[in-house]
Image (tube, rainbow, N blue to C red):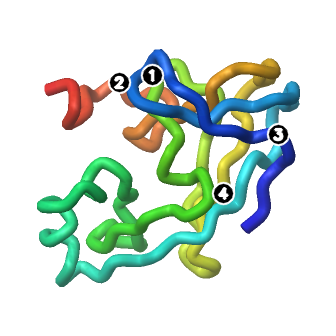
Amino acid sequence: MQQIPGLYIAPSDLGGRGVFTAHDIDAGSMIEIAPVLVIPPAQVKIIHETVLHDYYFRWGNDLESCAIALGFGSLYNHSFAPNMTFEMDFGNNTLDFYAYRKIAAGEELTFNYNGDLEDKTPLWFTK
């Protein structure tokens, strides 16, 4: 796992807790390379009946598997105006998070749970 220094968990106005930065982060900077635990397609149905349902990423070239990100990866909150993006690295089983724009010290780190910066499709927890 690789991550920049100064990341911390604190209560979030977006709900529950979130990940924040103690330092300014420049646009394009790597924030975290989070290893993932891959859950095979045959076990995906099971995860929907657990607390992990709200923390997984659809995974694999066909998105039939899912993954739980370690590090801070599964703790970043959602925003339709995010300050981060992420890339799925299937070869290394990592989620790689990058600053989409400059992020100020004290700001919460967020990404669009739909996986696309422009996708405003309602999410499962807002329907």
Residue sitting at x 46%, y 75% = 37
Q: Label 1 vs label 2: CA separation?
A: 6 Å
Pick whichever, 116 or 44, lies toward us: 44
Q: Are marks 1 and 2 in contact (CB under 8 Å)?
A: yes
Which residue is the site of mark 1?
Answer: 80
Q: Please identify the quarter of the rendering in which residue 34 is found.
A: bottom right
Q: Earlier in the sequence, mark 3 or mark 1?
A: 3
The mark lying in front, picked from 3 and 1, is 3
Q: Nearer the viewer, mark 1 or mark 2?
A: 1
Q: In the rendered image, which residue does mark 2 sit on? A: 120
Mark 4, secondary structure of its residue? strand
Q: Amino acid at mark 2?
A: Lys
Q: Pointers 3 and 1 in contact (CB under 8 A)?
A: no
Count of numbered circles in the view: 4
Across and down, in percent, residue 61 comes to 41, 72
Alpha carbon distance from label 3 to label 1:
24 Å
Compared to residue 31, the image places residue 44 above or below, namely: below
Q: Are marks 4 and 3 in contact (CB under 8 Å)?
A: no
Q: Is residue 2 above or below residue 61?
A: above
Q: Which residue is mark 3?
A: 6
Instruction: Please state which amino acid type lies under the numbered disc 1.
Output: Phe
Residue kind at label 3, given as amino acid type: Gly
Mark 4, residue position: 96
Q: Residues within 10 Å of mark 4 (few under 14, many from 20)?
A: many
Kindly state the secondary structure of the residue where label 3 is placed: loop
Residue at 14% x, 26% y is 127
Q: Nearer the viewer, mark 2 or mark 3?
A: 3
Q: Report the mark closest to the observer, 4 or 3.
A: 3
Sequence-wise first label, 1 or 4: 1
Determine whether the residue tagged by mark 2 lies in a helix, strand or loop. Answer: loop
